[in-house]
Image (cartoon, rainbow, N blue to C red):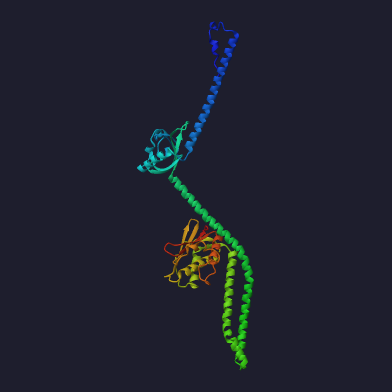
Amino acid sequence: MPVPPPSPLLHLPLGDLEGVDEATWLDVIQKMDEVYSKLVSDEVELEEKNAQLEQSQQFIFSLLSAMSDVLIACNQDGLIEETNAALCELVGRSEQALLGTPVIDLLADEQSLQRWQLAMYHSASRAGTVVEINLRDAGGQVVAVDLNCTPRHNSTGRQVGRVLVGRPLGELKRAYHQLREAHEALKLAQQQLLHSEKMASLGRLVAGVAHELNNPISFVLGNVHVLQRYAGRMNRYLDAVHQLELPPHVQALRDELRIDHLLEDLPSLTEGTLEGAQRTTDIVNGLKRFSTAVHEEVTQVEINSVVERAILWVKKGTAPRFEIHWVHGRDCYVSGNAGQLLQVMMNLIQNASDAAHTEGAKEPHLDITLERQGTQVILRFADNGPGIAQAHLSRIFDPFFTTKSVGKGTGLGLSISYGIVEQHGGQLSVENLPQGGAQFTLTLPLVAT
């Protein structure tokens, strides 16, 4: 606090104090002290307010400097009165060089000038106007900026200028692109999570169903085999009986009951029953594989050899004339079970053969390619069939879903393959190719060798 100077009355000549009584003197002294104390108090308060003002100015300056968006405060004539570091960096000029400069000097083209003038006109009557203009950056390049133009008023409410705040659209576009990519990744992860949860729930359900079906199917298979043996014995006996001279009423009963026709149909009936029971057994076994995680031996498996073995077995079995294009690539080792991976490869090749051999198809073939990408190996199975209907793409890996005709497939092959690939830490996906046909993509993590 400043030290108060001596009272001015102490410097008055003694002759000037003649005729002043003591009470008046004391009253003057008291008034002078009060005035002087008030001056000192006002000075202290003024210094405090100056300090607060400096703090406020420093705070506003730090905000303006930290803003990533460009800021322009201009008067009614469009002359720049205040700006920030973001604009200075963008246009390559100092703040002192920008002060008093017309905003239109920063514009890059005539179209931006027209938009600026239109925004100034509309902002006089609106709370805020958004305008996209092109500025010229420090390197002379055109930069699109999305500016929000807002009127600026003084303490009396009179409009004295405008404030423009905006961000270069390049950053917004990059941010939007990143947001869109994140959204797509989130949707894909959500779909995979829902599918995995659905498969897990369905697995628990079909495990019980498979167990319940297994016993009656065993009874059917066992009984049909016994019936076949019994039918053979019955045929031998009836053949011997029919060689005898039968009484007329027995011969008439034989014709009425169509015993000969029954004996002819009996083998095909038992064989059809066996085939149906065996097919049901295959479905139950598929359900077991689908619903349980099979803990088999895990080793380092070379993928090229698995693909070639799958090609050999499919061509020797159900598709001997199916043309498959494959080139043995660089050795790629994954951690897993060779038998399960072979099952996946054979299923994909067999499905491609079935799709490519549809009615009217010409020269059905399958292209299998192998590619290494970082720590992953990617196998693509591209056929030249009719492709997969768009409505079926999202369901292709669902259990019991099949596009094959009745009796041609159980609808469990791809769902089982999908589960095996997931257990191996990989991914199995499908898409239609622009030139026609479908492509299944199998991705598996590589192991260091």
Vertical position of residue 141 compared to residue 386: above or below? above
Vertical position of residue 132 compared to residue 417: above or below? above
Q: Quadrant of residue 425?
A: bottom right
Looking at the picture, how far across and down is residue 66, in whole percent? 48, 38
Looking at the picture, how far across and down is residue 69, in whole percent? 46, 40
Residue at image point 37% right, 38% down: 104
Q: Quadrant of the N terminus?
A: top right
Using the image as rendered, state which of residue 284 and residue 253 is in the foreground: 253
> Is residue 226 in view from this perspective?
yes
295 sits to left or right of 432: right
Q: Quadrant of residue 265?
A: bottom right
Looking at the picture, how far across and down is residue 38, in whole percent? 56, 20
Q: Quadrant of residue 219?
A: bottom right
> Is residue 329 in view from this perspective?
no
Looking at the picture, how far across and down is residue 72, in whole percent? 43, 37
- Name the residue furthest front: 125
Using the image as rendered, state which of residue 369 and residue 269 is in the foreground: 269
Residue at image point 54% right, 26% down: 48
